[in-house]
Image (spheres, coloured by chain):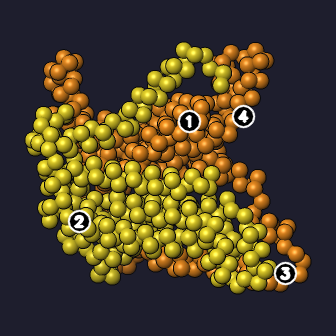
């Protein structure tokens, strides 16, 4: 565009500094995780993988990691099914109050997660489900479903609804049309939604603090406690692994999105 | 943006042959039934719990306003509300100040460079907030990377206090919230026709004048959407103020946690939750009056 070269260079300098600000902390933690000493030196004086070894062997970390994986997997399945069906109903359906329902479905994204967690705390304490994995699964599903709806809705709006009509007019039943025409055409966005809903649950901490407990401690909750009460260098290894998970998820979602563009 | 593409319903009416009309009606209503599982889930796990919050805040063996009276009577709660607004306003302003030039750079640069910048923003964006907050503790602590570097360089003798105060909270919050400002800004800026700026220039406007009088006003919907989004998220923020803030940065969100997990005062926690929701409702109402709901929810968001 019409910007003078020196101004442009300054803009790039500023942008570069800002990107550095965004990325550097994560890189610092990843490098720090390779320390041999427990003092979190940067750069490490001696390299070792002892904090990774500790993360993958101590029951204090392995238990919560497995629980988080289990919860995230179930949240992924439930929220993807609920959210995909809801998105199809909203975009293709025709009923009274459709727009109001759409806003209602997306609204948990605007409500502070502390307030959601507080409500879930009241709900699960009266249902005697506090400190049980199922409470976390339900809570995380509430956070993940709006995201699924938004992603699948965008995918549906980009596809051609007349294909579905063509299938119907050629005699396909309602369910066959859904199964063989609608769902295949939004495969990529559903897959991306599934991946992101997994990540949302895997990283979620506030609901885990409110409705989890000693019997249902997820990985983020364990990290939270460790950061608050005694900083343990194992955290640097855990953080690096979580970052790598996020990068893998991002790359996977990006690869899925490409064919549609 | 949405108005430009015909709704699926309109599309169906346009292409459907006349003889399929009766079947079409059934088909369309049956599609709508797919929202039911999610609706049941939302009523049980979303709406009912929210109503429990309202119930806890207004009832204690019968209707009562005790908890709200407690809130009004204690300066501690005013402080929490004031802190929340102060932290949120400051981080929104910082995000706009920093995010606008970055979004402008991305909107006006070549596609490949923009893609690289986008990936570099998305990686931290999808990294857990907890991980990023922990990273700042490692960097900003008294014995952290930044202070050690500054002392080694002779900039200061004693470590600067960068954690457990407003500085720490703002660094952590801006780090998390900046992408939420950049994305809506970028969405709006990418749709601004570069020719409008060329026309302004060819009519004799300086680059600065063309920017201020043409580009800036056209990017207004993005500014509005970004500010609302960041402000709403900031008001409800919990992890960052709790871990990077000190006693002076107690917010409504951290206060709710304290009432539940430390003081075991459920009614007060519930009334704080209601206050937080009301604050969010007011923000949304004010912004949508100023900018129009359509700009906030429709055209701005990506």
Percent from the top left, x then y, of residue B119? 47, 42
In x, y percent, where is residue A121?
33, 71
Q: Secondary structure at mark 1?
A: helix
How far separated are the C-alphas under marks 1 and 2?
A: 40 Å
Pointer 3 with pointer 2, Cβ within 8 A = no
Q: Colour of chain A?
A: yellow
Mark before the other along the chain sequence, 3 or 1: 3
> Residue extending furthest right?
B18
Question: How many other residues sit within 10 Å of disc 2, few (<14), some (14-19) or many (≥20)?
Answer: many
Q: Are labels 1 and 2 on one chain?
A: no
Q: Position of residue B69 (x, y in %)?
A: 36, 61
Q: Mark 1 against mark 2, which lies toward the viewer?
A: 1
Chain of the residue that carries numbered disc 2 in the rendered image: A
Q: Nearer the viewer, mark 3 or mark 1?
A: 1
Q: CA distance from mark 4 to mark 3?
A: 43 Å
- The residue where tag 1 is placed is B112
Left or right position of B16 against B188: right
Instruction: Give the CA separation, mark 1 to mark 4.
Output: 19 Å
Q: B112 or B143, which is in the foreground? A: B112
Q: Which of A161/B276 is in front?
A: A161
Query: Color used for chain B?
Result: orange
Q: Which residue is mark 4?
A: B193
Give the residue at mark 2.
A64
Give the camera-side residue of B217 and A240: A240
Q: Residue at x 90, y 77 (%)?
A: B18
Mark 4 is surrounded, within 10 Å at the Cα level, by few (under 14), some (14 to 19) or many (20 or more) other residues, namely: few
Horizontal side, residue A130 vs residue A2: left or right: left
* Contact? badges 1 and 4 (CB < 8 Å): no
Among the two numbered marks 4 and 3 on one chain, the one whose residue lies closer to the N terminus:
3
């Amino acid at each position: 565009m019409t910007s003078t070269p020196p101004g442009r260079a300054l803009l790039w300098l500023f942008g570069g500094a800002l990107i550095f600000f965004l990325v550097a902390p994560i890189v610092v933690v990843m490098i720090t995780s390779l320390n041999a000493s427990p003092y979190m030196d940067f750069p490490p004086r001696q390299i070792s993988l002892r904090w990774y070894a500790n993360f993958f062997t101590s029951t204090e970390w392995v238990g919560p990691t497995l629980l988080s994986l289990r919860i995230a997997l179930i949240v992924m399945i439930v929220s993807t099914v609920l959210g995909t069906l809801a998105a199809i109903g909203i975009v293709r359906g025709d009923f009274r109050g459709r727009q109001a329902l759409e806003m209602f479905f997306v609204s948990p994204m605007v409500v502070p997660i502390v307030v959601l967690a507080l409500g879930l705390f009241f709900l699960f304490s009266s249902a005697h489900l506090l400190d049980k994995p199922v409470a976390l699964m339900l809570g995380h599903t509430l956070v993940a479903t709006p995201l699924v709806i938004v992603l699948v809705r965008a995918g549906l709006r980009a596809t051609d609804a007349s294909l579905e009509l063509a299938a119907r007019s050629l005699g396909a039943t309602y369910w066959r049309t859904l199964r063989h025409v609608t769902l295949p055409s939004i495969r990529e966005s559903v897959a991306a939604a599934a991946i992101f809903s997994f990540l949302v649950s895997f990283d979620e901490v506030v609901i885990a603090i409110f409705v989890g407990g000693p019997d249902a401690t997820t990985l983020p909750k364990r990290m939270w406690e460790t950061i608050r009460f005694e900083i343990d260098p194992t955290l640097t290894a855990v953080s690096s692994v979580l970052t790598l998970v996020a990068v893998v998820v991002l790359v996977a979602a990006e690869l899925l999105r490409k064919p549609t563009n | 943006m949405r108005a430009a593409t015909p709704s699926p319903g309109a599309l169906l009416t346009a292409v459907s042959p006349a003889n399929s009309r009766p079947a079409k009606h059934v088909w369309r209503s049956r599609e709508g039934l797919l929202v039911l599982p999610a609706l049941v889930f939302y009523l049980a796990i979303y709406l009912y719990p929210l109503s429990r919050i309202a119930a806890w805040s207004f009832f204690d063996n019968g209707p009562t306003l005790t908890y709200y009276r407690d809130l009004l009577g204690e300066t501690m709660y005013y402080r929490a509300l004031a802190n929340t607004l102060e932290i949120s306003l400051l981080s929104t302003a910082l995000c706009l100040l920093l995010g606008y030039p970055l979004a402008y750079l991305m909107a006006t640069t070549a596609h490949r460079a923009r893609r690289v910048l986008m990936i570099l923003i998305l990686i931290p964006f999808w990294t857990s907030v907890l991980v990023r907050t922990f990273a700042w503790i490692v960097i900003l602590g008294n014995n952290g990377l930044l202070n050690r570097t500054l002392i080694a360089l002779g900039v200061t003798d004693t470590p600067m206090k960068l954690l457990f105060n407003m500085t720490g909270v703002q660094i952590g919050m801006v780090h998390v919230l900046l992408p939420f400002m950049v994305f809506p800004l970028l969405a709006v800026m990418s749709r601004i026709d570069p020719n409008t700026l060329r026309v302004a220039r060819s009519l004799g406007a300086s680059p600065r004048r063309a920017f201020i009088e043409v580009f800036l006003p056209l990017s207004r919907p993005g500014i509005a959407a970004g500010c609302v989004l960041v402000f709403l998220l900031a008001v409800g923020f919990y992890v960052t103020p709790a871990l990077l803030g000190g006693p002076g940065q107690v917010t409504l969100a951290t206060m709710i946690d304290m009432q539940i997990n430390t003081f075991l005062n459920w009614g007060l926690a519930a009334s704080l939750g209601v206050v937080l929701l009301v604050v969010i409702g007011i923000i949304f109402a004010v912004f949508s009056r100023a900018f129009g709901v359509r700009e906030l929810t429709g055209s701005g968001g990506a």
